[in-house]
Amino acid sequence: MNAAAGAKPRHFPIVDVDVHHNFKNRSDLFPYMSRFNAERFSEYGFGVQSSTAFNGGKLGRRIDIIDENDPPPADIGPVAYDVDDTRARLLDHYGIELALLTGGPGQLASAMMDADFGSAICRAFNDFSIEHWLEKDSRFRLALHINSQDPAGAVAEIERVGSHPAVCAVMLGCGAPRPFGNRFYHPIYEACVRNGLAVAMHFGGEGAGLNPPPSAAGYPSYYIEHRQLRPSFYMVHVSSFVFEGVFDKFPSLKIGMLEGGFAWLAPLMWKMDLDWKGLRRQTPWVERLPSEYVKEHIRFATQPMEEPDNPEALKHIIDWIDGGRTLMFATDYPHWDWDDPTMTLAGYPDDLRRRIFAENALDTFGLELPSMSKAA
Amino acid sequence: MNAAAGAKPRHFPIVDVDVHHNFKNRSDLFPYMSRFNAERFSEYGFGVQSSTAFNGGKLGRRIDIIDENDPPPADIGPVAYDVDDTRARLLDHYGIELALLTGGPGQLASAMMDADFGSAICRAFNDFSIEHWLEKDSRFRLALHINSQDPAGAVAEIERVGSHPAVCAVMLGCGAPRPFGNRFYHPIYEACVRNGLAVAMHFGGEGAGLNPPPSAAGYPSYYIEHRQLRPSFYMVHVSSFVFEGVFDKFPSLKIGMLEGGFAWLAPLMWKMDLDWKGLRRQTPWVERLPSEYVKEHIRFATQPMEEPDNPEALKHIIDWIDGGRTLMFATDYPHWDWDDPTMTLAGYPDDLRRRIFAENALDTFGLELPSMSKAA
């Protein structure tokens, strides 16, 4: 066990629910694909392009961690992450006990017109992740990538590798032809519950391939604008999960929403509750206040933390959304706008930080800390 | 002048920036159209359908004001509003000094594939509004309807009737093929500035006709979900106006965003400011904090007011968005979820209410109170 190597003394463990891993070269996935799919992936790549491709930092990553002697190949873009770098600079350096690896290609694979090819890429990526990341460090946990627009294929993949001890969630990208509360997706949730997996939701794929544009007004021109839409990428799904009755149908299902921030959740819960009082005859299966469903079933990663001028404002927001229950710490390593765990929520009470930095993630993803199992 | 008829004594005047008027029957617009367009409108209507058509109340309106002996014709839906009803029940009853009429067909007309027909419907509606609403009561002001996807036609319409003394704004619907900061629309803003008109923005048309679906995940199933998307309908445009440099190019332009609420603005301004610090080399023409542009140029209608459990939360939100400067009172009459002026922001300080109930709207739309001109 290397969980404590390099850790500074602190009062609580850290679980990081959004660590980006990926393959470095397309050829990394070839061993896990048919020759036909490998040739296609080699020649054409994903064949769909995300409108978020232009980014900050350098290729989306922290400039200081890029090895100039080993630049990412041009055909991969900002996804050439390194397992040893992540272990040393993130896990060891900050004493992170568990890290959820979020990848990956699922958001774009789910936007492909050819559903089988999208599912094949996800399958290859999961096998690659198990061999080249999970097996390299016991602190890694994995959110399986699936093709959300191929529910039968997604269920097959969940059944194939969902029982791996380090797999704890299934990844859904926010961009999609229909919101994720829709009954089209329910077989996926059924498979999650059957395998004891949570759902991890991460933006990506908006406006790509078969997905609609990222907003009701189409495509913005600049990356900085696209970032302002992120809350909306999650709002539609929060509302859809609640009002389509997903949590009434799957009462044990938990959902972690990653890299979307959380300050927007307070106004959304107020509005859902108010509208439910006036309109609930339209969705009579929603028997409680929408905010109660959210607080029971949905969790939100802290990064990118909103930073109001007045730090008191953030305290109020965290209070209004019951952050001690709904928030989970995330670094978003190695992206340029990552959050440093030593600076995140510094000055907040230790019992709140303990829940946000570890307990809520352990509950949501059904995890056990290495330090706990060692003690047992 | 009938401005004071029926008014209760109060310490400040009321300007209502979102009163829905409309035609009752398609034939109401025929006198203002070519025979060809009248026949087409009679036979086919708009030819596009808004995904918000299912609504609350009765056909979207307050149930208590519907005359059962004069139900709206089935082909019009929830838009059969009455000028005498609005004068008596809204203006007289509450002593409202000025009311901005917001209509209307512009949102759907802008979603039509046939740009000339969309512009013709807007033109007819503006003429109808002038004859049957503005000329019936001097307290009415009008936001012109235009076909936003036909900028040349929109500019021609602004030049045709923009100088009418009761016209004070140009209406844009939120649903559109591209965000409203885009240079495609700049001729419209140039015409607004030239005619001393503000922009009034109101949701509508999302997912209709040539517009993209209402979210990055397509169409939700239920009306209550659609309401949760409303903040996102405005967020994309707030961000677009700022980052496309619209206010740098048109420094006198003011925009009123109506019926979208405002609590979501606080997190959006925090996020825009933070992201601008990290990414401003991508849009170097944005020389100040995005929130400064918002506070200077964009105003938000109070209705539908967010109602947190804890009323203190609303006070904080209003403080954080500088509500004494950015908010304008609106009833949204005659919709079922309208806000009663006697109950809106009751208990807030009088100087704040005075600005929200009148002064900010007068500034934004360049209006003068009837009571002021009488005194002069």
Image: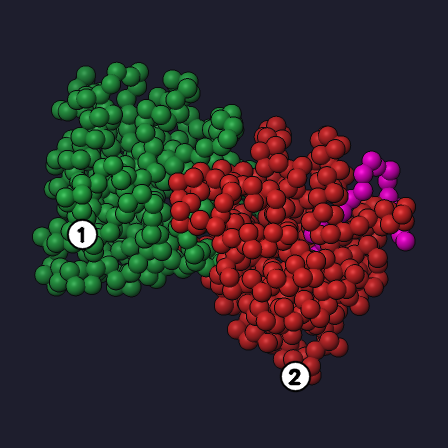
Chain colours: A red, B green
Tag 1: amino acid: Pro
Q: Name the residue under label 2.
A: A36
Q: Which chain carries label 1?
A: B
Q: Does residue A29 belong to the magenta stretch?
A: no
In the picture, measured across the screen, residue A82 lies left or right of residue A218, that is: right
Q: Distance between the residues labelled 1 and 2?
A: 60 Å
Give B332 or B187, whichever is nearer the viewer: B332
Residue at 72% over, 39% down: A355
* Residue A163, x across and y down, in percent: 75, 64
Residue at 75% over, 69% down: A128
Number of residues whose C-alpha sits closer than 10 Å to that of mark 1, classed few (under 14), some (14–19) or many (20 or more): few
Residue span colored magenta:
A1-20
Q: Mark 1 points at which residue?
A: B73
In the picture, measured across the screen, residue A21 lies left or right of residue B226, that is: right
Q: Is residue A315 above or below residue A92?
A: above
* Residue A316, x across and y down, in percent: 59, 30
Tag 2: amino acid: Phe
Residue at 60% over, 39% down: A306
* Residue A106, x across and y down, in percent: 63, 65
